[in-house]
Image (tube, helix red, strand yellow):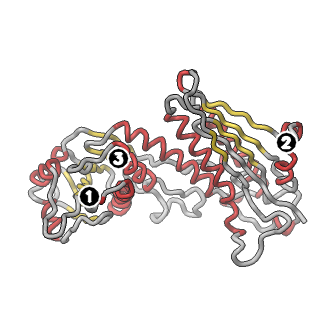
Amino acid sequence: MYKLRSRVFSVSLLLSSNSVAQGYSLGGSLPHRFSRGVALRGGASPRAAAAGAQEAATAVPLTSASLAASDAAASDWTGDMMVVPVWEAKEGESIALGAEAAALDAALSGAVADLIADSEFKGKAGSSAVVSLPRGGNVRKVAVVGMGLSTDFKISGARKFGATLATLATEQKPKQAAALLPTGPALAADTQQAAFEAAMLGLSPDTRYKSDADSDENKPPPLQALALLGADAGALARARSFSAGVLLTRGLVASPANYATPTSLAACAKEIADRFEGMTLTVLERAECEARGMGAYLGVSQGAVEPPKFIHLCLSAPGGGKPAKKIAYVGKGLTFDSGGYNIKAGAGSMIEKMKFDMGGAGAVLGAARTLAEVRPAGVE
């Protein structure tokens, strides 16, 4: 019986990242029945895919659209689509536009108010309505997005707002778009960050393993720029860092085991260490693990073609001073869990999903990437 297991334990993040990755490959010394008939995108063999895993198991690309904070007045902006957020009115009351939205409505000859009235728009959280405007004006389309009741608004509502922005960009296909931020009440910086993260993630589909990545169904929206009117620039920058970390984790976890090997996880950690100041990397190879007496760890990957990788990332405190806080994260990185001697088989075993058993390591690497860019003060 072959033991086809592999693991990654990551102690990484604010402080340090200790990853153990042990591997499983679809090729190599396994019986022929295990390696036969595996078709990979691009025609690569399983062994070739494992050898090129550093290039294959990458982050889901962050949207190429430019999201930027802007102080421009909505009534002066020109482009394909303007998005106006509105709070849900209490029972017996009408939706009230904020000062910027009202000025925009006046500049558009009442188009925003007409859209709300004609569509009987209530402002429920996540709802939206769109109308095309006559040619010759500053804006081709105007959309309203419901924020729900202001008294019930939470971070989850901000994420819903951001996700709705991404949906509108996908469905309406503007190249140049703008969105007002809610007022009365305005969104705090952390709430804005949650909304911007949701928008960026919604605009960043994973098409890496699609057979037809360029089809209308799979390709990202044609959005080139989204101006966020009245946005906090710091919140937007943090949202970009957090989104990049999430997309790295998504990319690793969604990659099949013949791409996301221990070698590719180690290469991912090296990319993080090379790119960001203050991040250092140590990778223990099999011989070093044997010298340290790590027999239980090494036994997990004993039947695998891929060698194990024990990955330790460490992020120093900014400025090189003594950290006020040390934090360690550990992430399991079993790159494919076949069940070992008790091999998974039959309905309900989830054998086809066992690539996600390295999700803990993927989450740690994504968090490490975000923290390396954000560099929280006083933290190692």
Q: Who's the residue at 53% across and 26% down the image? A: 318
Mark 1 or mark 3, earlier in chain: 1
The disc labelled 1 sits on which kind of residue? Answer: Thr
Find residue 100 and report its horizontal and vertical position in percent.
Answer: 16, 48
Q: Residues within 10 Å of mark 2 (few under 14, many from 20)?
A: some
Residue bearing the label numbered 2: 286
Q: Earlier in the sequence, mark 3 or mark 2?
A: 3
Residue at the spot 27% in from the left edge and 50% down from the top edge = 179
The residues bearing labels 2 and 1 have C-alpha atoms spaced at a distance of 57 Å
Disc 3 to disc 2, C-alpha distance:
46 Å
Q: Mark 1 to mark 3: distance in Å?
A: 17 Å
Q: How many marks are shown on the rendered structure?
A: 3
Q: Position of residue 349 (x, y in %)?
A: 72, 72
Residue 126 in the figure: left or right of residue 108 = right
| Quadrant occupied by the C terminus | top right
Q: Quadrant of the N terminus?
A: bottom right
Query: Of circles 1 and 3, which is in front?
Result: 1
Tag 3, which secondary structure?
helix
Q: Which residue is mark 1?
A: 151
Amino acid under disc 2: Arg
Q: Out of 93 and 311, give the one closest to the viewer.
A: 93
